[in-house]
């Protein structure tokens, strides 16, 4: 009998102390997705956006490198722009796309037998043609000959940056007659990468499935864990058992006050005596990322303070996810999450001496929610154009490690309120948090179908940050009740994060890791 490859997973049935096998049935809506990497489609998309009928795109892949003074090196990581045009995830390659001829060629290294002995072989041209949707695959030894011949007949060479230009002797002779464009390609590729094709969505969905199962396994084993490092190990173990060997980013497993550090990565402290642990971890699948965060109570019960903050963050996330659809400005989701946080912290007494509208517009909510609501996900976990999702008008410096402080928050509120007023609103906090107007035009912070973004609100009690920028500032400290806040320092922080696909009419949550009541049921945690 011929063997059949069936997608499945092993599931521990706690109730019966047994192991079951769950067969995973393919989604019929996705059965038509090609298993070849759609490199030709990506190349044509970029050529169309460039608006050129002539020219050669040239992108080198990454090479193996060693650490200084060592014969060992870091794990290989392919250049993502190169990968987008090929799907090839091994070192020493290049790619060319001839726009006029519509010919995409992958150039691969030949592996001599002595190298095979130590490291194994790289895919052959035949292997590559079977895996990647390219027109031709040739050895890199022929690349200089091809470029010399073809560049003598075209006008433009497109490269990502000047350091990526071809490196061979004859190229210097060709340079004077060529227009070498080092500025057009990256923005065009960014625009292409931010809107995912069906194949890419499938890969990110698979990465999320792996990560979600790993988060579930961590939750199931929580009572046997005593240190942050064991959460990291349990997550990694589950991913590798599912044949996902690469993490999209360093795992964050922060308990207690460590949960208030957004990119904590020591993962080496005991869980005892802490209330919560934040596990922010996501695997890659074929170079495509996932980004998933869950916050778990430590022990058999939630403290009242931890439960209150968890429920508030859960509400922030759920309401923002429900609002995702094409045309929505991501800034408005950020403001909505912040307004929910301010109202909730007022109810808990952490904020006082003002209305929600007053405190919201003052920017004081950023003391506890100091980061962006999310970012794009794709070949990078913080994928291309992520910095533009929330960049306020006039902000030139913006990025992953820049907190959203009071000034940035007030700038977003002012932008949203201005648009709201121009469309007939009254400029209130609710209008600012909900404003989405087509009069802003097409911008990178506006959601479009087939974008994948994270929604990851959080509330944090970072003593040094809140003391330095809020409790010592009269503009903010008047709204913060220090006596009540004292009870919440030990909570540390709560973050909940899912990857959300923007669809034609709304959204699809690609992350299935348990959260809320489902998570608490697995943990057996009482309220």
Image (cartoon, helix red, strand yellow):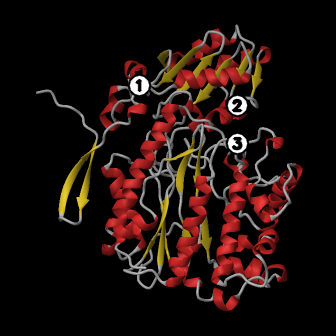
| Left or right, residue 464 beside residue 309 | right
In this view, the mark in front (1 or 3): 3
Residue 8: percent from left, percent from top: 27, 44
User: Which residue bears the numbered disc 3?
Assistant: 327
Mark 1 or mark 2: whose residue is earlier in sequence: 1
Q: Quadrant of the C terminus?
A: bottom left
- Of badges 2 and 3, the one in the foreground is 3
Per the image, the residue denoted by label 2 is 188
Q: Residue furthest left?
A: 1
147 up-or-down from 68: above or below: above
Q: Which mark is residue 131?
A: 1
Q: Secondary structure at mark 1?
A: helix
Whether tag 1 and tag 2 are in contact, CB under 8 A, the answer is no
Please tell me whether mark 3 sits on a helix, a strand or a loop. Answer: loop
Q: Could you tell me how far apart the alpha carbons at marks 2 and 3 are, in whole angstroms?
A: 21 Å
Q: Position of residue 76 (x, y in %)?
A: 47, 43
**Looking at the image, which is closer to me, 311 or 111?**
311
Residue drawn at the location 47% of the way across and 51% of the way down: 511
In primary-sequence order, the first of circles 1 and 3 is: 1
């Amino acid at each position: 009998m011929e063997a059949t490859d069936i997608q499945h997973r092993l599931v521990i049935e706690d109730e019966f102390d047994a192991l079951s096998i769950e067969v995973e049935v393919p989604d019929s809506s996705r059965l038509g997705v090609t298993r070849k990497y759609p490199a030709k489609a990506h190349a044509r998309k970029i050529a169309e956006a460039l608006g050129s009928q002539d020219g050669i795109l040239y992108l080198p892949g990454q090479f193996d490198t060693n650490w200084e003074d060592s014969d060992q090196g870091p794990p290989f990581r392919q250049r993502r722009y190169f990968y987008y045009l090929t799907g090839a995830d091994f070192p020493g390659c290049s790619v060319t796309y001839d726009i006029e001829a519509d010919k995409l060629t992958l150039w691969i290294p030949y592996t001599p037998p002595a190298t095979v002995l130590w490291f194994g072989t790289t895919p052959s041209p035949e292997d590559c043609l079977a895996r990647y949707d390219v027109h031709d695959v040739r050895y890199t030894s022929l690349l200089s000959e091809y470029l010399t011949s073809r560049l003598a007949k075209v006008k433009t060479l497109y490269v990502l940056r000047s350091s990526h230009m071809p490196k061979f002797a004859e190229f210097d002779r060709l340079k004077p007659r060529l227009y070498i464009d080092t500025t057009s390609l990256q923005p065009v590729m960014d625009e292409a990468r931010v809107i995912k094709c069906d194949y890419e969505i499938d890969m990110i969905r698979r990465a999320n499935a792996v990560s979600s199962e790993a988060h579930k396994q961590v939750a199931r084993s929580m009572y046997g864990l005593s240190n942050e490092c064991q959460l990291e190990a349990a997550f990694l173990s589950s991913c590798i058992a599912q044949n996902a060997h690469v993490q999209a980013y360093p795992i964050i497993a922060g308990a207690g006050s460590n949960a208030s550090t957004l990119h904590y990565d020591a993962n080496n402290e005991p869980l005892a005596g802490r209330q919560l642990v934040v596990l922010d971890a996501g695997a890659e699948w074929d170079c495509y990322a996932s980004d998933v965060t869950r916050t778990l109570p430590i022990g058999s019960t939630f403290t009242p303070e931890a439960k209150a903050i968890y429920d508030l963050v859960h509400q922030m996330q759920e309401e923002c996810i429900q609002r995702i659809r094409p045309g929505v400005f991501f800034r408005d989701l950020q403001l909505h999450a912040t307004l929910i946080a301010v109202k909730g912290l007022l109810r808990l007494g952490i904020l006082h001496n003002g209305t929600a509208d007053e405190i919201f517009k003052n920017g004081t909510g950023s003391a506890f929610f100091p980061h962006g609501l999310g970012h794009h996900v794709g070949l990078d976990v913080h994928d291309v154009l992520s910095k533009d999702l929330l960049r306020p008008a006039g902000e030139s410096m913006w990025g992953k490690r820049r907190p959203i402080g009071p000034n940035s928050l007030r700038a977003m509120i002012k932008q949203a309120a201005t648009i709201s007023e121009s469309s007939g609103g009254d400029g209130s906090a609710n209008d600012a948090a909900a404003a989405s107007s087509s009069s802003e035009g097409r911008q990178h912070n506006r959601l479009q179908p087939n974008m994948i973004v994270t929604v990851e609100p959080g509330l944090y009690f970072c003593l040094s940050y809140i003391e330095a920028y809020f409790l010592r500032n009269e503009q903010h400290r008047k709204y913060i009740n220090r006596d009540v806040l004292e009870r919440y320092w030990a909570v540390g922080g709560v973050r909940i994060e899912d990857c959300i696909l923007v669809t034609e009419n709304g959204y699809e949550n690609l992350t299935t890791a348990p959260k809320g009541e489902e998570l608490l049921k697995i943990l057996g945690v009482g309220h």
